[in-house]
Image (spheres, rainbow, N blue to C red):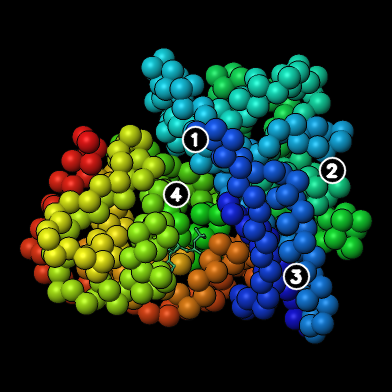
Amino acid sequence: MQAYIVSIDQGTTSSRALLIDQNGRVLYTEQREFTQYFPADGWVEHDPDEIWQTTLAVTRAALDYAKQLPGEVKAIGITNQRETSVVWDRKTGEPIYNAIVWQDRRTASLCASLKRDGVGAGVQEKTGLLLDPYFSATKVAWILDNVAGARARAEREELAFGTIDAFLIWRLTGARSHVTDASNASRTMLFDIRKQQWDPELLDLFRVPQNCLPQVMDCAADFGVTDASVLGQSLPICGVAGDQQAALIGQACFAPGMVKSTYGTGCFLVINTGAELVTSQHQMLSTVAYRLDGSTCYAVEGSIFVAGAAIQWLRDELNVLDDAAKSAEMAASLDDNCGVYLVPAFTGLGAPHWLPDARGTIFGMSRDTGKEQFARAALESVAYQTADLVDAIHSDGSTVNRLRVDGGMANNNWFCQFLSDVLNLPVDRPSNTETTALGAAYLAGLHCGIFPSLDAIENNWNIDRSFETSMQPTQRQQLLTRWRKAVDLAAKF
Ligand code: ADP
């Protein structure tokens, strides 16, 4: 008898559901995009009801597809865009405001003023995070302060807060479960990642009442059972993790030192640091990778805001290419980068620089600079940014030995080879790059017995291709030196 998991992948631009079997094979995928709202400069919102409706539609489609197969769906796993925050009415289940998305910068001045008050180090010590609007805490406070009557209602215990996982679980279980997992909780900036509990001082600092918060569970746990009136059947939800942590699990990076890097719109590099919580001195984030059977595995994470988006920009704004994949042959058509460097700081620079005011800049052009140089500079810039993250990790005392890659850009062989060359590390691309959805399925499967252990999951990980470094050290040094000079100049512009 075959056993299947439905993995819900609630992302920033679309909701997806995948049907995954006990060998980790993806049998079916359904996806719906939803509306992005930009109500003011730097504000990004989603309609939680649209998130819910799209999630419901894709989940039902996956369950319908499963009906014709010789087996049954055993459980649901959920992975989600992290930090995005929803506050809803406990009685009606209706959100009191749109979801404030992780990209939203409306609380930048609040974060800056908290920084001036000198609380940053204490916040980092407890949460592993840097004081920034990116995380949930100031988003929740904003909703409570700006929706009429919200704070009073929260004090009367009428409101619930959750990241997207918690909101979906609440709805899927017919309001019976108000829960989240430790990986999502670790992104709220309200959660003490050493003690594994909501922190009263942080709740005070960010003015978030404790009674709004979900209960924090292991990543493989009983999160609740779907209400039969919602999905037509009662299924246990038993695996939950934030998207990047789920990708770490989907890449089977279970041993300390193992690293995955996801190259989509942006890039998220995560290194497993095991039971040890490493606090970065180089502006990387510490976070919960996963918590299983009460034991927490930690990670260090670095995010780059613009990775594949640089290629998208070349395609959509400059018409340098009509298909992202063409960037590989364009880059390969040149013997070298002709001295052209792109710093794609379109929305500032993320880790490890954290330069919100840096802007996209291109250096080193000559009269014969053309489309190929632009394509190459864009691909190279993503590799250089990764090198900066790996450098920060090394400076913090951890060692990266090789890198597992996924995401749209990982399909680009030229990029993977250049990445390996610049990092001086082997780069491994798995045959199944649906790592985020796989991670959630693995967690659910661990809890309901489809996957007996992490070792069994590790055995499912297969390599598609490994890229070995072939660049001379002097050349690598030259490239990185010029890149760093370009970043310095971009920061000063
Ligand atoms: P997301 O999940 O963030 O939407 P995906 O993992 O689907 O991202 O990857 C899409 C991104 O990857 C786009 O920004 C696109 O420009 C880039 N991309 C896709 N394929 C390639 C390729 N072969 N070479 C370079 N970039 C690519």
What's the CA distance linking mark 1 and mark 4?
A: 29 Å
x, y (%) of residue 410?
40, 69
Q: Residue at x 88, y 63 (%)?
A: 233
Which of the numbered marks, if any, corresponds to residue 62? 3
Q: Residue at x 38, y 38 (%)?
A: 279
- Which of the four quarters of the rendered structure image does ligand 1 lie in? bottom left
Query: Which callout, 3 or 2, points to the residue nearer the camera?
Result: 3
* Quadrant where the image shows the N terminus: bottom right
Of pointers 1 and 3, the one earlier in the residue sequence: 1
State how far apart marks 1 and 3 are (Cα).
Answer: 35 Å
Taking the view exactly as shown, the residue that stands out farthest to the left is 474
Q: Secondary structure at mark 3?
A: helix
Most foreground residue, 274 or 119? 119
Q: Which is more toward the observer, 481 or 464?
A: 481
- Give the amino acid type for the residue marked by disc 3 in the picture: Ala
Residue pointed to by mark 2: 175
The C terminus lies in quadrant: top left
Q: Seen in the image, is 258 located left or right of residue 204?
A: left
